[in-house]
Image: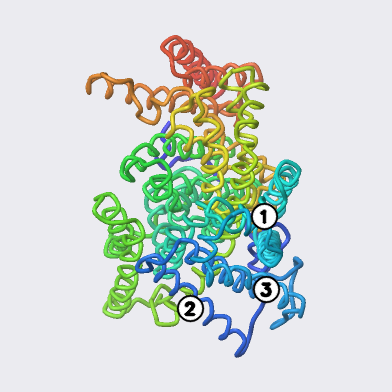
Amino acid sequence: MSFLRKEKETPPPVREAVEEVQDTGTAADVEEVMKKYDRESNTRVWVGWQKWVVKCLMIAFSLYCLYLTLWDTSLPEFRLAMFVGMIVVIGYLNFPMRKGSVEPNSMPWYDIVIMLAGALPFFYFAANAAKIKTTSAVSASQDPLMLLLAILGILAMIELCRRSVGIPILCVVGVLLIYAFTQVRFGKVIYDLFYTTSGLIGTPIATCQKYIVLFIIFGAFLERTGISAFFINLANCVAGSASGGPAKVAVISSALCGMVSGSSVGNTVTTGSVTIPMMKKTGYKGEFAGAVEAAASTGGQIMPPIMGAAAFLMAEYTGFPYAQIALLAILPALLYFTGIFIAVHLEAKKLGLKGIPKDQLPKFSKLAPKLYLLLPLVILVALVSSGKNTMQFSAAIAILVTIVVGVINNIVNSITKNPDTTDNISFMKVLDSMEAGAKGTITVAAACAMAGLVAGCITTTGLANILLRAIVSVSGGVTVIALFLTMLCCIVLGMGVPTTANYCIMAATCAPILMSEEIGVPMIAAHFFVFYFGIVADITPPVALAAYAGSAIAKSPPMKTAVNATKLAIAAFVVPYIFAVNPTMLFQFEPGLSTAMKVVQAVLIIVTSLIGLFGVASALNGYLYRPINPLFRVLIAAGGLCMMIPGNLTDVVGLAVVAAVVVFQRMGAKRSAAA
């Protein structure tokens, strides 16, 4: 049963396919749904000279961030306070108080007051950073002016986070703030959260300012060089003609595009506008088509070597070399996308869907000359992997290479007289990229600031030990239960939060709990665990933003699309438990093991995991050669899970069960065909 071979099944009736594809969302439909569910999509509308004023401020912010990251040597307090102060300014210029459309050039007086009052404390802190740093914490925490400014600054960032990110994370922040105020003196809490680098301007904001901004700007430049279209065309070459080809194209292209974009929602909209109509035209139901795109786009965030820039951050947080992080992420990502690939293939077989005719697909020979579009990614990975350059320097070089590649692309299009010049670089596109980078930074910085408040409250009150004891107590010392409770925390904290900020939050709050002696999950496994479950919040109801974006394009019920996406992404809910309990899946072997045995164990876990995933995916889909009855669905799911759990006995039992069900289904299908 080949996953790529073109099949001879009869396609759905042409009339039904045409009717289905016509019922797809327009750009306006997508925008309406995203404004309803996604805070980041609710931005002010600027036109005329006001648009250029805001645009210039955004570009200036991006340039200033480049300067801060590469050359600034001032105090961290000065650098971070200036950064957050500028985020407040551009944040309120872009995000209105309420959801929905706003009048062009409309910014109420109260928003202007909030913006100025919210930015002032940070600029005051920056101007007096050296003095405040040497001032006694006790006296500073009793200074009425300093406390008032700190309160204004914290409230302004909380409100900006509400506007740009959403409410779920603020519920956590609110509970922790109330707890902190009941446990520690009010003035000390406010001082610790605002005037130290263990609060609002703590590690998450420092990471955002130092690394994340450059990767966001880099992603904005990449999008304007035509790399998304290149990935989609490449995926069409590979899988477009296979059974149910458009869905497989969506899986491959979304994995590649999402890896770069760093946004599950953004990637769903970008690639989904092409792939979802193709899937519906082929015969997939709307809720399934939207789910495939959402699940694959979300999975792009765990796709090495970029992982939506999270790979570079993980290297910073864990101390593991970047090259090792990218290597360790390969198998979990392979399992994730294989699971989705199997599901769409079985759905295609169940519905009898064909692929796209080969004469309608792009030829690789015509795509090959465009391989230079990948040069910025190759150079970025090479520079970081070498260990000789900092990540921020590597990202800056990659941005410059992207511009150079864009110029080369212009020349190639001109020489070849390519009529499609939409991916040509221009001075305006450079400015647009800088602006888009600044806008993308707002939501990430707001979420990172909230992560700093969460970490600050936990540090000030000593809540970490209390949380740890609570999880250990509730779990009864059983690791799997502790992992389950942590998973729930990650999904709640990750709702609506961009990938990079998402990981910063998880690394600061949830990973240390798993790494404690009481639970004992190895560092790298703990970080991968919390990262995975933070990411899947984008497709997990009730706040499944990527699924809602897919449903807007597919014109399908949002919740039904989210449920389908969760089923497709089943590997993301199973694999993290496996490598948390047994890190062999992350190629973490027992000390003293020979190289030959390491290879054997690695191959064994890859094979058994893939077979196990096939069993689980078949059970969820309910089809394998023919429809599977409920009893066999339970059996093959149990067998698949057994194979994914490390252990020789479980592997043997699982293999026997999966093989028996497959053989029985195959024989039944042959008998039905003969009859």
Q: Quadrant of the C terminus?
A: top right
Sequence-earlier tag: 3 or 2: 2
Q: Is residue 77 visible?
A: yes
Marks 3, 1: nearer the viewer: 1
Q: Amino acid at mark 1?
A: Ile
**Disc 3 to disc 2, how far (Cα)?**
18 Å
Q: How far from the left and from the top, in percent, is residue 259?
A: 44, 52
Up the image or down, 77 lies above or below 198; here it is below
Circle 1 residues within 10 Å: few <14, some 14–19, many ≥20: many
Say whether residue 555 is left or right of residue 134.
Answer: right
- Residue denoted by label 2: 60
Q: Residue at x 58, y 58 (%)?
A: 195
Residue contact at pointers 3 and 1, CB within 8 angstroms: no
Up the image or down, 63 lies above or below 21; here it is below
Up the image or down, 318 lies above or below 80; here it is above
In this rendered view, identify the residue nearer to me: 75 or 348: 75
Q: How far from the left and from the top, in percent, is residue 474?
A: 68, 22
Secondary-structure class at tag 1: helix
Sequence-earlier tag: 3 or 1: 3
Q: Amino acid at mark 2?
A: Ala
Q: Quadrant of the N terminus?
A: top left
**Disc 2 to disc 1, how far (Cα)?**
31 Å
- Residue denoted by label 1: 190
User: Tag on residue 115?
Assistant: 3
Say whether residue 620 is left or right of residue 144.
Answer: left
Marks 2, 1: nearer the viewer: 1
Q: Amino acid at mark 3?
A: Met
